[in-house]
Amino acid sequence: MDAAVDKLSAAMDGLTAGGAPETTDKPETSQKPENTDKPEATEKPENNVPQTGDTQVMGLWLVLCMGTVSCLSVMALRQRRR
């Protein structure tokens, strides 16, 4: 068993890609860093939203709807009492 482990260890030690030197964990340092392109400034979108001409106040419609529901509720309650 020890002989097989020794052979396997020796085979693993000899494994390199085409006789290339063993690699290290340290990365190679370069003399001058690469220049990168600066990102372009983003353009603000133009505010070309078309006007619909709708100038009604939504609150007015809500008040009118609540008033209508109130009136219908009162009428229904009075109808039940009779």
Image: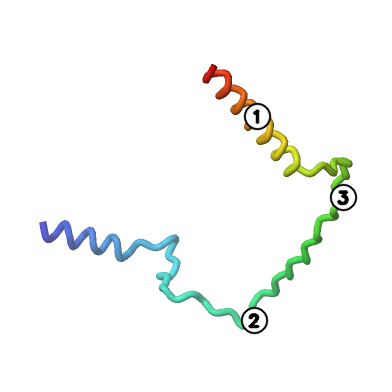
Which of labels 2 and 1 is toward the front?
Answer: 1
Residue that protrudes farthest toward the left in the picture: 1
- 67 displayed left or right of 7: right
Residue at image location 68% in from the left, 30% down from the top: 68
Residue at image location 21% in from the left, 60% down from the top: 7
Residue at image location 85% in from the left, 55% down from the top: 46
Q: In this view, does 16 lie above or below 70?
A: below
**Where's residue 47, x and y in %?**
85, 53
Q: Which mark is residue 48?
A: 3
Query: What kind of element bears circle 1?
Result: helix
**How far is the residue under mark 2 from the one under mark 1?**
82 Å
Badge 2 amino acid = Lys
Indicate which disc, 2 or 1, sits on the residue closer to the N terminus: 2
Indicate which disc, 3 or 2, sits on the residue closer to the N terminus: 2
> How many neighbours does mark 1 have within 10 angstroms: few (below 14), some (14-19), or many (20 or more)?
few
Badge 1 amino acid = Cys
Residue that protrudes farthest toward the front in the picture: 82
Badge 3 amino acid = Asn
Residue that protrudes farthest toward the top in the picture: 82
Which residue is labeled 2 in the image?
32
**How far is the residue under mark 1 from the one under mark 3?**
44 Å
Q: Colour scheme of this structure image?
A: rainbow
- 42 displayed left or right of 33: right
Q: Residue 71 carries which label?
A: 1
Instruction: Give the quadrant of residue 55.
Output: top right
- 76 displayed left or right of 4: right
